[in-house]
């Protein structure tokens, strides 16, 4: 009899758990049908942003404008300009504060790189390159930074950009803002991108089940994407080799003009606290060191922050004004020691 009662209590408990789970899922299903969740589209910033005129790079005295969605402006950064970011170019077609002439002298720095060094998504006064120039000027080191960085450029394209301007602007330094995707091909927001498997029937049958499967896919995709980036074989790919050769060529071209060449390694803004990509940075540093190329690694400078605190938008992992400020402080400190030492 006692055993029967025990079994009865066990069965009742199981039934209660099942009923509770069913009711929870049922309520969740109703909520999702009444207020559907919208998945954030990654690696397509123009899915949410708008441009007011044609996007052009390297055009002297040109300006194009981009409007960022205010509903994603968690920091309030875009509020004062109502989402508007303006990209101005100086007399050389380099990014500048306004579409006007940038004053330069004999002591200049030619800057090349991709969207991170360009300052994509932030006002130019908040881009780390401009902040470094300002900070150096305050210490008595007067240099003009002429920023020819262009979104989407890899190392080979940066070499071409330098070759186009190297004889037009007298310069003492060349700074190359190197992002990992200059050597290993992937979009900026690649790690957080989710590979959505075909779930059309499940989606129609149950919104709750579709949501849960989506979360599983998100975790799995993130793990797979990170694993691909950490593959040691990446350094043997033609893309890596060709772009590393371009960096070597940049050093040679710089030396011909008695200028100093510096590579600034910029971080992937994912898992910054865990420093998941440290093996990748170490591998790049080893290659640079073997070729006697000077560099500074900024990848560890943001390790005290949460990833999302450093992004311009939840759907775009480009560095925001906070990350740019951190980069500027560390790079300025490094340059002051080098130039005054």
Image: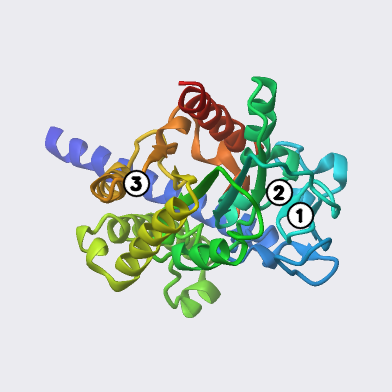
Left or right of residue 142, residue 337 in this image: left
Neighbourhood count class around disc 1 (C-alpha, 10 Å): few under 14, some 14–19, many 20 upward? many
Residue 76: x and y in percent read: 76, 37
Residue 245: x and y in percent read: 34, 64
Read off the residue under disc 3. 293
Residue 26, above or below 156:
above
Read off the residue under disc 1. 68
Instruction: Verify CB contact (< 8 Å) between mark 1 and mark 3.
Output: no
Of mark 3 and mark 2, the one earlier in the sequence is 2
Residue 312, above or below 168:
above
| Residue 198, quarter of picture | bottom left
Front-most of 259 and 70?
259
Looking at the image, is mark 3 or mark 2 nearer the viewer?
Answer: 3
Read off the residue under disc 2. 72
Of mark 1 and mark 3, the one earlier in the sequence is 1
Under circle 2, the secondary element is helix
Looking at the image, is mark 1 or mark 3 nearer the viewer?
Answer: 3
Left or right of residue 5, residue 164 in this image: right
Left or right of residue 194, residue 91 in this image: right
Front-most of 219 and 336?
336
Instruction: Verify CB contact (< 8 Å) between mark 2 and mark 1.
Output: yes
Front-most of 187 and 239?
239
Under circle 3, the secondary element is loop
Q: Residue at x 45, y 58 (%)?
A: 253
């Amino acid at each position: 009899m006692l055993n029967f009662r025990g079994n009865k209590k066990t069965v009742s408990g199981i039934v209660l758990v099942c009923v509770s789970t069913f009711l929870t899922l049922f309520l969740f299903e109703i909520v999702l049908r009444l207020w559907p969740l919208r998945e954030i589209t990654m690696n397509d910033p123009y899915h949410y942003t708008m441009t007011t005129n044609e996007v052009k790079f390297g055009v002297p005295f040109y300006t194009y404008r981009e409007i960022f969605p205010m509903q994603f402006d968690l920091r309030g950064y875009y509020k004062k300009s109502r989402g508007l970011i303006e990209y101005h170019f100086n007399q050389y077609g380099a990014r500048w504060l306004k579409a006007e002439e940038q004053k330069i002298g004999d002591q200049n720095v030619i800057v090349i790189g991709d969207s991170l060094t360009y300052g994509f998504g932030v006002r130019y006064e908040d881009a780390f390159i401009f902040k470094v120039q300002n900070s150096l000027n305050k210490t008595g080191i007067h240099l003009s930074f002429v920023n020819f960085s262009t979104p989407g450029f890899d190392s080979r394209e940066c070499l071409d950009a330098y070759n186009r301007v190297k004889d037009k602007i007298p310069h003492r330094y060349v700074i190359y803002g190197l992002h990992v995707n200059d050597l290993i091909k992937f979009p900026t927001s690649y790690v957080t991108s989710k590979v959505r498997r075909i779930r059309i029937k499940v989606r129609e049958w149950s919104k709750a089940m579709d949501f849960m499967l989506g979360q599983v896919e998100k975790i799995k995709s993130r793990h797979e994407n990170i694993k691909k980036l950490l593959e040691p074989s990446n350094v043997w790919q033609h893309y890596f080799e060709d772009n590393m050769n371009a960096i070597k060529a940049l050093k040679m071209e710089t030396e011909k003009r008695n200028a100093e060449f510096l590579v600034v390694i910029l971080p992937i803004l994912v898992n910054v606290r865990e420093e998941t990509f440290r093996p990748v940075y170490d591998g790049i540093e080893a290659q640079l060191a073997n070729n006697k190329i000077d560099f500074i690694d900024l990848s560890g400078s943001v390790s005290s922050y949460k990833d999302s605190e450093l992004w311009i938008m939840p759907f775009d992992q480009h560095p925001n004004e906070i990350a740019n400020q951190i980069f500027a402080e560390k790079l300025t400190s490094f340059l002051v020691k080098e130039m005054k030492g």
